[in-house]
């Protein structure tokens, strides 16, 4: 018996809004954050982090990785502060399914970062996001058999340039398992990513019900996907993070 289903789709042309005033009332909002010019943000953002987050940041050996982590977590706190009406440095996270960070307030969120970009999704539905940098040196064919179904492998290999197709499907899968909190495991290859609606055993997802995952592009060379519970009738709103929030009320 199928107790879950996943609809896979794509947004061909995303409009990135620059005014985030309405984001705190959106059912689902997705923010892209340019990390490449964020070094001057760090003193302010670092003050918002919890002792645990500061400790986690210190574990990164590379300064670029520490910058990405601190920048993403700091911006996440600023955005959540707008939704929860709490000071950004007072927001407390709890461990949910598979230790996925959650809030007690009814808001859901998820983050991802790659290269120069971070992606943050916040909404009133369970959500997962993934962004990847298309790495020209990554031997993606080495993971095809373990990570994709035969039909998905055929789809990827049918393209003359298979690399973008690999990342297109990979981001959908990863966003999906982040939304449910299941994470990557031996069932990852059975998580659907091709266009259409796919019924499947809820145990593969870790959650029952209907889910939607949609691909889009953050910037050139950065494919991404957002997954959420519910039908595809829910359309996320997309925002470019406003740097003015960093020095504004937090």
Image: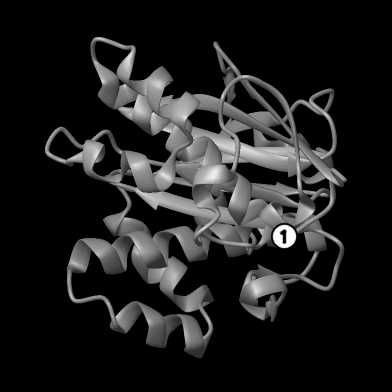
Residue 105's place in the image compared with 16, above or below, is below
Which residue is rendered at x = 80% and y = 62% of the image?
Answer: 84
Q: Quadrant of residue 215?
A: top right
Q: Nearer the viewer, residue 163 or 32?
A: 163
Q: Quadrant of the C terminus?
A: bottom right
Which residue is rendered at x = 63% and y = 62% of the image?
Answer: 182
Q: Is residue 76 visible?
A: yes
Q: Left or right: 36 with respect to 217?
A: left
Q: Secondary structure at mark 1?
A: loop
Which residue is rendered at x = 46% and y = 58% of the image?
Answer: 72
Residue that label 1 marks? 206
Q: Position of residue 245 (x, y in %)?
A: 57, 50
Most extreme residue toward the left is 137
Residue 217's place in the image compared with 27, above or below, is above
Residue 231's place in the image compared with 207, above or below, is above
- Mark 1 surroundings within 10 Å by alpha-carbon count, few (fewer than 14), some (14 through 19), many (20 or more): some
Q: Nearer the viewer, residue 61 or 240?
A: 61
Q: Nearer the viewer, residue 127 or 139?
A: 139
Q: Quadrant of residue 220?
A: top left
Q: Nearer the viewer, residue 87 or 104?
A: 104
Q: Left or right: 228 with respect to 55?
A: right
Q: Position of residue 239 (x, y in %)?
A: 59, 32
Q: Position of residue 68 (x, y in %)?
A: 34, 59
Q: Left or right: 13 with respect to 164?
A: right
Which residue is rendered at x = 71% and y = 62% of the image?
Answer: 81
Q: Position of residue 19 (x, y in %)?
A: 64, 31
Q: Left or right: 109 with respect to 74?
A: right
Q: Quadrant of the N terminus?
A: top right
């Amino acid at each position: 018996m199928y107790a879950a289903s996943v609809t896979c789709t794509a947004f061909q042309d995303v409009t990135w809004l620059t005014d985030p005033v309405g984001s705190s009332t959106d059912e689902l909002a997705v923010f892209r954050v340019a990390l490449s010019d964020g070094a001057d943000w760090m003193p302010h953002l670092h003050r918002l982090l919890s002792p645990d987050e500061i400790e986690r940041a210190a574990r990164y050996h590379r300064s670029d990785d520490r910058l990405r982590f601190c920048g993403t977590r700091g911006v996440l706190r600023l955005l959540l502060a707008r939704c929860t009406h709490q000071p950004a440095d007072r927001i407390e996270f709890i461990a949910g399914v598979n230790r996925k960070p959650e809030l007690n307030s009814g808001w859901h969120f998820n983050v991802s970062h790659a290269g120069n970009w971070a992606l943050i999704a916040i909404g009133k539905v369970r959500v997962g996001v993934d962004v990847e940098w298309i790495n020209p040196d990554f031997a993606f064919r080495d993971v095809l058999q373990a990570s994709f179904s035969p039909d998905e492998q055929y789809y990827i290999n049918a393209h003359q340039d298979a690399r973008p197709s690999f990342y297109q499907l990979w981001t959908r899968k990863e966003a999906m398992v982040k939304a449910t909190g299941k994470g990557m495991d031996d069932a990852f290859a059975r998580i659907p990513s091709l266009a259409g609606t796919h019924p499947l055993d809820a145990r593969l997802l870790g959650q029952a019900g209907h889910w939607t995952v949609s691909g889009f592009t953050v910037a050139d060379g950065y494919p991404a996907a957002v997954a959420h519970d519910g039908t595809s009738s829910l359309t996320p709103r997309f925002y470019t993070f406003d740097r003015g929030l960093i020095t504004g009320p937090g």
